[in-house]
Image (spheres, rainbow, N blue to C red):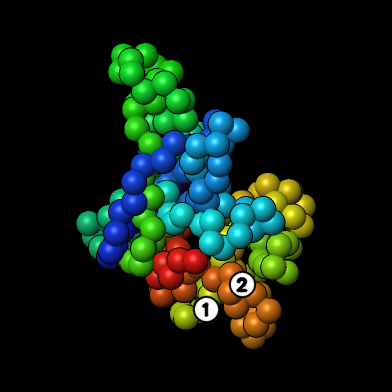
Amino acid sequence: MALKVINAAFTGKGWMAEASSTILQGMVVALEASSAGTAQLARADRSTHKVHQVAGLAYDNAYNVGNTIALLDPVTLTYSAVASRKIADFQNEIIVNQTNLTDTGTAKRGVTVLSVGGEYASDQYSSTYILTSATADVLGTPTYTVGHQWTYGSATGGATATADIGLLVADVAAGTPEATSSAQLGVASITDGVSGGLLYFRWIGP
């Protein structure tokens, strides 16, 4: 869930997450219609959500498992992703009832979305999957070279179907040239690679 905002231009409104979203802070999220026709957020899936459906980066959690936070080391002055302990009642934002603030199953707010520009560091990226086509990923070693384009994961391809949806995924394998067939899929550009378990990137959005 760790997301360090280095420089952000705009914070979007809070949309409710779909009940099974498992959204963590720093994930790429897409806006879609719920069964009732209202707007809801889901982990962005390149095999399902087109680039224009990408809402931005989640700035809140809608899940209470695997949460982390970006903390500054006072000695090295670098950020690292570490485990985060939070009050689950305020952390779980997936329930639609928003009226009883003392009910542990009640949503407190929607998920805030960072939607326009900015520079970030997040642990919500895949180090084991890379893009293989416009709608599929494959196991591979990504490149973290400054300036390289990254996109968001797909549930199609790879060993585990849903392993990288919502995560940033490299558009290029280590040692290969930048992919050209997926030029319209990029949502992030690498700035400083990986440090302390965090990927540093510039959000360029859909």
Q: Which residue is most to the left? A: 74
Q: Please, is residue 188 above or below residue 85 in the view?
A: below
**Labelled disc at residue 171:** 2
| Disc number placed over residue 89 in the picture, else none | none
Task: Looking at the picture, tell me which residue is in the foreground, 197 or 31.
Answer: 31
Label 2 Cα neighbours within 10 Å, binned few <14 / some 14-19 / many ≥20: many
- Which kind of residue does numbered mark 2 sit on? Asp
Residue 76 position in % (x across, y down): 27, 63
| Residue appearing at x 64%, y 75% in the figure | 182
Q: Is residue 53 visible?
A: yes
Image side of residue 197 versus residue 89, left or right: right
Residue 104 image position (x, y, % from top left):
39, 16
**Structural distance between the alpha carbons of marks 1 and 2:** 8 Å
Q: Is residue 177 above or below residue 19?
A: below
Q: Do callouts 1 and 2 mark residues in contact (Cβ within 8 Å)?
A: yes
Residue in view at x 36 percent, y 63 percent: 116
Q: Tell which residue pokes out farthest to the front in this image.
A: 37
Q: Earlier in the sequence, mark 1 or mark 2?
A: 1
Mark 1 sits on what residue? 148
SS at mark 2? Answer: loop
